[in-house]
Amino acid sequence: MPRPPAAHELIATDFMPTLYLVPAPLDFGCEAQAPLQDALPLGTLQAAARLTHWVCENAKSARAYLKRIDAVVPLAAPLQAQAIHELPREVHKKGDHDGAPAPAAIAALLAPLREGHDMGLLSEAGMPAVADPGSSVVRAAHEAGAAVVPLVGPISILLTLAASGLNGQNFAFVGYLPQDAEARRTRIRELETLALRTGQTQLFIETPYRNAALLQALIQTLQHHTRLAVASGLTLPAMQVRSQSVKAWRTAPTLAEERLPAVFAIGR
């Protein structure tokens, strides 16, 4: 019985150009970084090291990540020779949907793919196109007739869900909550009502320096029996996952490290 291919062997047959979705470690922006091989399988690092054409959120952070890969698995081309192109700025402001960006702008980024080169898609942390930009690139690759291969790596939303004890059979990721205090309270109540009525776990995120404000808003707004889970610093030595009733949160309403990347979840 033939063995299944390893991640670095997942090259499409008949020389079909392939877009690889390359996950990045979850320590972006953190002072401490975990060893790369602790967060990502060797096969993923080997597959990434073979690529020389990239689409990314930020070229600077992409180069920093490739430098870390090179320390584990030598890159196929020197860092200076890697072709790295950023997604259009409007993607960061408006997202990948509802007509932004223009399809032509994304198609231009995939010119190497149409020329027969494999390419990689990178976000700054986690899996590209999941809670991060990149879905427009994936759609364009499909429309160009290329293969799309997601590589194995950490996804903070799923790690949080698995560790939360909340409903993992029915859940939704809703992105960021409003920054305005009253609008945020209204949104929290809407999500809580949905979670308690349907059993659907609601997951969301915040910029790390606003984690404390969001946590306080959740504790003050949610009903005492609602379950609140917060996972911060996932895959890092300072990782913390707390999942308990809001009533219990009110006895210790802070996180050990408030400025680490975090995912929040509520449910019953």
Image (cartoon, rainbow, N blue to C red):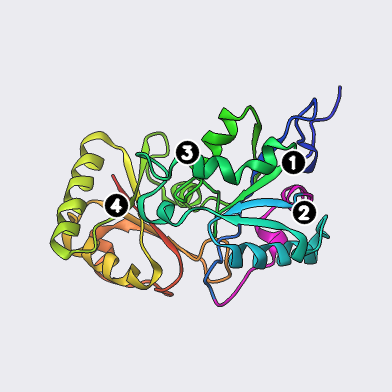
Q: Is residue 153 visible?
A: no
Disc 3 is placed on an element classified as: helix
Q: Which residues are magenta?
A: 31-50
Seen from the viewer's position, the closer of residues 54 and 223 is: 54
* Res 261 visible: yes
Amino acid type indicated by mark 3? Pro
Instruction: Residue at 16%, 57% (x, y): give it.
Output: 183
Which residue occupies 33% across, 57% down?
244
- Indicate which label's residue lies in the foreground, 4 or 1: 1
Does the stretch in magenta take in 49? yes
Percent position of residue 109, x then y:
59, 46
User: Where does the image place residue 218, in percent across and percent down from the top left?
Assistant: 24, 61
Residue beneath label 1, please? 117
Quickly name the residue at label 3. 103
> Distance between the Cα atoms at labels 4 and 3?
42 Å
Mark 1 or mark 2: name the one nearer the start of the chain: 2
Residue underneath mark 2:
49
Residue mark closest to the camera, 1 vs 3: 3
Residue type marked 4: Arg
Residue 188 highlighted magenta (yes or no): no
- Give the Cα distance between marks 4 and 2: 42 Å
Q: Give the secondary structure at mark 4.
A: strand
Image quadrant containing the N terminus: top right
Badge 1 amino acid: His
Structural distance between the alpha carbons of marks 2 and 3: 28 Å
Q: Quadrant of the C terminus?
A: top left
